[in-house]
Each structure stands twice: as C-alpha cells, then as structure tokens.
Image (cartoon, helix red, strand yellow):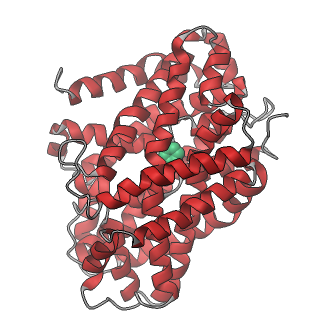
Amino acid sequence: MAREQWASKLGFMLAAMGSAVGLGNIWRFSYVAGESGGGAFLVLYLFFVVVIGVPLLLTEVSIGRKAQSDVVGSFAKLAPGTPWFMTGFFGVLSAFLILSFYGVVAGWAIYYFGKYITGEFFTAPEAGYEATFGGFISHPWQPMFWHALFMILTIFIVYSGVKKGIEFANKIFMPTLAVLLVALAVFSMSLDGASAGLEFLFKPDWSALSNPGVIVAALGQAFFSLSLGMGAMLTYGSYLSKQNKLPSATLGIGLMDTFFAIISGLVIFPAVFAFDIDPGSGPPLVFITLPSIFEQMPFGEVVGIVFFFSLILAALSSSVSILEVPVAYFMRIWNWSRRKASIVMGLIMFLLGITVSLGMGIWSGVTPIGDNNILDSFDYIASNILLPLGGLSMALFVGWYFNKSTALEATDMTGNPVAGIWYSIIKYLAPILIILIFLNAIGIISF
Ligand code: PHE
C-alpha cells in the first residue's frame, strides 16, 4: 500500500503546528518557568528555540521527507548498515513515556471542561480550587476515567488516517485558542497585583542560571514544546512530498509555538501573583490558577468552557503526533493495519499512564528519580534527556553523515542566504551546546 501524504503543504503546516502547540505551551511552560525562576529561564528558553530549536526542526522534518519512512526506518534507509537507526528507538521510547503522562494531564483538562459545562467551577468549591484539584488528581480512579477518554479520542483520530482526522481538527481550533489566550492575557494583566507577575517573567534574575538544572530545563522545554528530537516531526515530514519547501514552514511553526508560550506566560503569571499562588507549584500550576481568573472575569463561565474545549483539542493535535511515531513504525515492521497499530500502541500508553495517574495519589511515594514522582520522572527522562539526545543525533546525522550539498538539498537550503549559518549550527553549534549542557548537568564541567 502506498504511504499516505498530506493533502497540501498547508495541511502539513497545520498538523505540525498542532503537534507543537499543546499542553507544552500552556501547562508545561508555565510550571517549568515558575519552578525555574521565571525571567532568566524565559530568556534561555527563547535562546534555545532560536539557535537550536528552529534549525533542528528543519533538520528533523527533512530527514523524514527525504527517507519517506518512520523514525527508525528513515535512518535505516538513509544510512543502511550503520547504528544510526538507534536514534529511532530512542524516539519510540520517548513517545511511550511522553504520551503516558500527556494523556493523564489532558484527562485533567477534560475533567475541568466538564466542571465548566455543569457550572460547578463557576464559583470556587468550598475547599477552594487548589484543594479540590488536589483531591481529584490524587483520587485512585476518577482521573483514570478522563485519561481513558482522552486516549480513546487520540486513538480514534490516529486510526481514522493522517489526512482526514488530523488536518481537519487543526484547522478550526488553533485560531480559537489563540484568540482566547490573547483575551485572557489582557484580562490577567489588568488584575490588581499583576505587575509582580510581569516582573517575574520579564526581569531576569540571572542567578537562577547558576543551577545547572535550570539550563537543562530550558533546553528540555524548547525540545518538548517544538515536538523535537522524538521523531514526531520526522514522521510528519515523511508524509510530505519534495515539492513542498521546508525552511519557511519550519520558521512559521517555531514562531507560532513561541507565540503561544509567551502568551500563556502572560495569562498565568500576572494571575499567579495577583491571587497569591506559588509559582513553584509544579504540574498543578495552571489548573489552580485558571479557575480563579475565570471566576473574576466577565463572561468567565463561557470563556472557561471554550478555553478548556480548545485546550483539549490542542492537546489532541499533539497527542496524535506522539502516537503516530510508534504507529508508523509498527505498521511498517510488523505489517500491521493502521487500526491495529493505533489501538495496541494507544492501549500500552494508557496502561503506562495508569502508573502516572496513581503516582499523583496512592503511589506518590514511588519516586523513580531523586524525589520526583512518576510523572516528573517520566517527563525528566523523556524531555530533558531523550529528546535532546535524539536532537543531537539528528544534527550529527545531517551535519556529519551527509555531505554539505546533500544536507542543503535535503532541507531546501541550497542557495538560501542563511544556508551557511544553518549548516554551521547543525554541524557544530547545536551539538556542542547540547553536549556542554549535559556535561554541566552531570557536573563534569561547570559554566
Ligand atoms: N509539543 C507538544 C506540546 O507542546 C508535545 C509534544 C512533545 C509532541 C514531543 C510531540 C513530541 O504540547
């Protein structure tokens, strides 16, 4: 059977933007920035997006487009008989780890959506939003119901096929989310005490960077948010034909993703300070901040409903790109139908996600890495270690395994005025930076 293709370059762009924009921009960006000192983290994150993220995005998509195969198959095809295909295995592993917690958090968003539909969260519940949320996520089975629902939706979209399912959902809901976030940001900044939040986000306290963990966190956030290093963008690139030019598309994706992150920061931090919430609250941060905003805002009830609905769709357009990575791989190696591959892989991710969900409550004492619970540990391994390693490998592949003219041709950079800069980044700067950040994190060198 012929491999599927996007209907148009626009279809690809919307799907890739859909992959990039998701819980990573709103939920993950806010809490990681909040835990990592705010301003200095933001500057470093932006630096990584520009000097590593966008150039690498072009690189990753180009590998898939050139090979027309999945994340393992692409390397095996372009570099037969070499160990490069191992990059793909890391990608498939990251996909399992990421979707297992992504699905749980998206389930929380569905629960909130329900609370706004029924009106229960229009005013704060007796125990307050924070305690009510804490009670919900630590419940042994309630969150699993919403998590299961989210995974079923993800599986359904992936198995209904690349074009119909994914392209369609993205065309409608990304603009809705953008408009809502801008309106929320304007309102949030008008709250009493909002300026402390703006200061937190825009006045860098550089001493935060003396903690190597903050540097790794900024790198991990850049990778996570741009869906980089795992093969999601590679797999999406593999459904593109050679006629579609890549550089402008990848730049657009990078800009859009960054826009959503900064706007989310402008929604969350002014409110965090106005409502006296701890910016270091971790993964619950947006879930305890947003309801207080909606409660105060004119038409907040309606905004709450539309916001959570759009957030769920943004999460879905990302989760389908994650599930697509193993699905494309197992469809090829085991000759499975799309339907079978999506159901089986989605089910495994759901089961893995159950451990994440229990880790928020009865298994909160299970701390695989340091004192991190299961969610934080999975996230740490995938986002801060596997994704940057995957990106490092892709940069080395295009920078060193290909010769220069092949690299430029694969990325449509031949004759481009910034081709030289892009090539030096991929060949030298990005790999060196990633390696230095890792060495710094494990204490071998110190910045
Ligand atoms: N970028 C997505 C988000 O921000 C998450 C994601 C990570 C998707 C890695 C694919 C690969 O929500």
**Quadrant of residue 326 within the rendered picture:** top right
**Nearer to us in this view, 392 or 375:** 375
Query: Can residue 416 be spotted in the picture?
Result: no
- Give the total number of marks visible in the rendering: 0
Q: Residue furthest right?
A: 1
185 left or right of 36 in image = right
Q: Can you say which quadrant of the picture contains the C terminus?
A: top left
Residue at figure coordinates x 60%, y 61% from the top left: 152
Residue 77 point in image, percent of width and height: 68, 17
In this view, 3 is above or below 307: above
**Nearer to us in this view, 79 or 441:** 79
277 left or right of 100 in image = left
In this view, 165 is above or below 82: below
**Quadrant of residue 155 within the rendered picture:** bottom right
156 left or right of 141 in image = right
Residue 179 point in image, percent of width and height: 56, 70
Residue at figure coordinates x 66%, y 13% from the top left: 406
Q: Can you say which quadrant of the picture contains the N terminus?
A: top right
Residue at figure coordinates x 52%, y 64% from the top left: 148
